[in-house]
Amino acid sequence: MGVTEPPVVVRIEKVRKRFKVRKDNSLKDRIVHFGRHGKTHREDFVAVRDVSLDIEAGTTVALMGANGSGKSTLLKLIGGIVAPTSGTIRTRGRMAALLELGAGFHPDLSGRENVYLNASILGLTRAEIDARFDDIVAFSGIADFIDTAVKFYSSGMYVRLAFSVAIHTNPDILLVDEVLAVGDEAFQRKCMDRIARFRAEGCTIILVSHSAQQVAELCDRGIVLRKGEIVHDGDIDEAIGVLRDVLEGRDEASAAEAAAEAPIRVAGVDILDDSGERDRSFGSAESIGIRLRLESDRPIPRWAAGFSVNTPLGHMVFASNTDLLRTSLPVIDGTLTLEFRVDALHLGAGTYHVHANAVATEEGGVHGISHGATFTVETAEQTLGTATADVSVSIGGH
């Protein structure tokens, strides 16, 4: 018997969302133009432009792009918060959406009353809310304020309670838009862990985040939008690289042109564990493999290749290449893989991106890919920064 494909839980077909935007934004302009040619001072803004995609059950998808790219509008369309101008959106299963801070909360009601209101909107019965109420409050960590009107809550308290309600509805589809940027680091980690658990249990998660660390840790698929259109849909590592190109003004056409002109091309990067299997998560001081997949259109006798490991902010942690390692390389003709083994990698906790490049030594023409792969490091060491070490302390007498 063949492997059964997971069912599609979100289907978007040729969806377009157009908004009317006023051009006379100042009060003076509005007074001057009041009652005269009103339509001439409005223009169409297309936030989402003829988007089609399927999202299968159990996948974790990041919607990525610069500000104004349409990613948050697309998430609201999926959640039914706004209606498409044209096209169709079909979803199946219980959906919980964390799209706007405290959306669905009534400011004059207490936290307790808003839990019952919001959870009922998300589809729970009174009995189900009663059964889960204590867990909702415990996860939010604001038990002392649960009977206070939410208009007196801080933004962090809002999102704690909203997130807690949403995740306790046991949704089939969870939509998240930047709300994990609010709250302290400990609560963000708690939310990330819960989302990771949902993912392991087969929940479909669609999120918008500006954090490369978050999407690399949580997502297996990345969709990059630019001016309302999808410019990339695929592996999350590739999507992070495409997003970087978009943010820095490079497009896929120029990248493809540069690759076509290069004598040697980096086709891809894989991060490997000790057994040679692809992996994304490592403990500090574990060894990792960095495999470069290279291509050439003709025999090239003298060449070199290398990699760098960078932080999400673009700071290089370390790098190496075949020249530094004095590696004897064969003639490359067609495809070839090159694997670097990094032993006892003492990196601090966080997410790291691997960049790679290759060059024909006698011809020049370097080709590289940024964000070719992404991996995360977890560490128990009580240190901060991008490196770890065994640290001890002693106190001497005067």
Image (cartoon, helix red, strand yellow):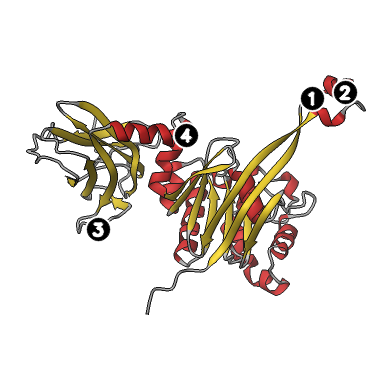
Provide residue 332's location: percent of width, then percent of height: 14, 41
Q: Are marks 2 and 1 in contact (CB under 8 Å)?
A: yes
Judged by depth in the image, the label closer to the viewer, 1 or 3, is 1
Q: Which residue is mark 3?
A: 277
Q: Can residue 72 be seen by looking at this rendering?
A: yes
Foreground residue, 332 or 273? 332
Identify the residue shown where x is 50% and y is 59%.
194
In the rendered image, which quarter contains the C terminus? top left
| Label 3 crowd bin: few (<14), some (14–19), many (20+), radius 10 Å | few
Question: Which residue bears the numbered disc 1?
Answer: 24
Which callout, 3 or 4, points at the residue further toward the start of the chain? 4
At x 18% / y 31%, what residue is drawn? 360
Classed neighbour count for the residue bearing mark 2: other residues with Cα under 10 Å, few (<14), some (14–19), many (≥20): some
Say which amino acid is labelled 4.
Val
Query: Could you tell me if the residues under marks 2 and 3 are in contact, i.e. CB atoms within 8 Å?
Result: no
Residue 342 visible to an observer of this rendering: no
Q: Amino acid at mark 3?
A: Glu
Foreground mark, 3 or 4, reads: 4
